[in-house]
Image (cartoon, rainbow, N blue to C red):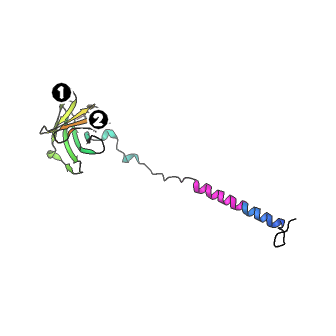
Amino acid sequence: MNARPSGRSPSGRSILLVVIGLAVAGLAGFGAMHFAGAPSTPPVEEIHEAEVPDEHTLAPSLDCAFHDMMRTHAVVSYYFDVAVSKSEAPRFYERAIVAENGTRTNFSGDDRPAWTYGLDGDGKPMITSPDGGERIVLYGLKLGLAGVWPVEAGIRSNTYRNLGGECRQTNLAARPG
């Protein structure tokens, strides 16, 4: 056997202890890497169905946003309550307008401007402001249809020129009663 510089040779028992120590350290390291690398389970949030209203119970409305030419931000947004009847044209009551700078003007009750519904020169549905200065053309408006639907739109006015945008129509079906 080769002698160590100290003059003693390793015993079988000390070699066994070193091998066992290395094995334990290796297993401990492997176990730590396994548990540290395992993704944690995200917390499960309970969703109560009562918190999400049925879309068919939402009041009839039309909400529109019109963007700048590059579509980077909204220039103006309109929010309307809609009165729908089987025997009359729908009536659009302006609930709010939000300007590009974030200024919001709310209307309620009899102070809500009433926009008129009609067809433009190309037969597309549109609504016109009370003073006639602004028109919103609603391509693909789905009158008589319940649910929530996207509608492509464009605004025509001296203030906003010709901007494209989109609206969300909600429950524009005539309600009984």
Q: Is residue 95 above or below residue 146?
A: below
Q: Residue at x 29, y 35 (%)?
A: 151
Sequence-first disc among 2 and 1: 1
Q: CA distance from mark 2 to mark 1?
A: 19 Å
- Assess disc 1: are there few (<14), some (14-19) or many (≥20) residues with their C-alpha within 10 Å of its C-alpha: few
Residue type, mark 2 in image: Val
| Residue at far right of view | 1
16 horizontally vs 28: left or right: right
Quadrant in the picture for the N terminus? bottom right
Q: Residue at x 22, y 31 (%)?
A: 125
Residue 139 image position (x, y, % from top left): 26, 31
The number of discs equals 2
> Residue 67 falls in which quadrant of the image?
top left
The residue at which mark 1 appears reads as: 121
Q: Which mark is residue 19?
A: none
Whether residue 33 is in magenta: the answer is yes
* Majority SS type along the magenta span: helix
Residue 11 image position (x, y, % from top left): 84, 67
Which secondary structure, mark 1?
loop
Viewer-proximal residue among 63 and 20:
20
Whether residue 104 is in magenta: the answer is no
Residue type, mark 1 in image: Gly
Viewer-proximal residue among 10 and 88:
10
Which secondary structure, mark 2?
strand
> Residue 29 falls in which quadrant of the image?
bottom right
Residue 2 image position (x, y, % from top left): 86, 65
173 horizontally vs 6: left or right: left
Magenta range is 23-43
Residue 109 image position (x, y, % from top left): 16, 46
> Residue 31 falls in which quadrant of the image?
bottom right
Quadrant in the picture for the C terminus? top left
The residue at which mark 2 appears reads as: 151
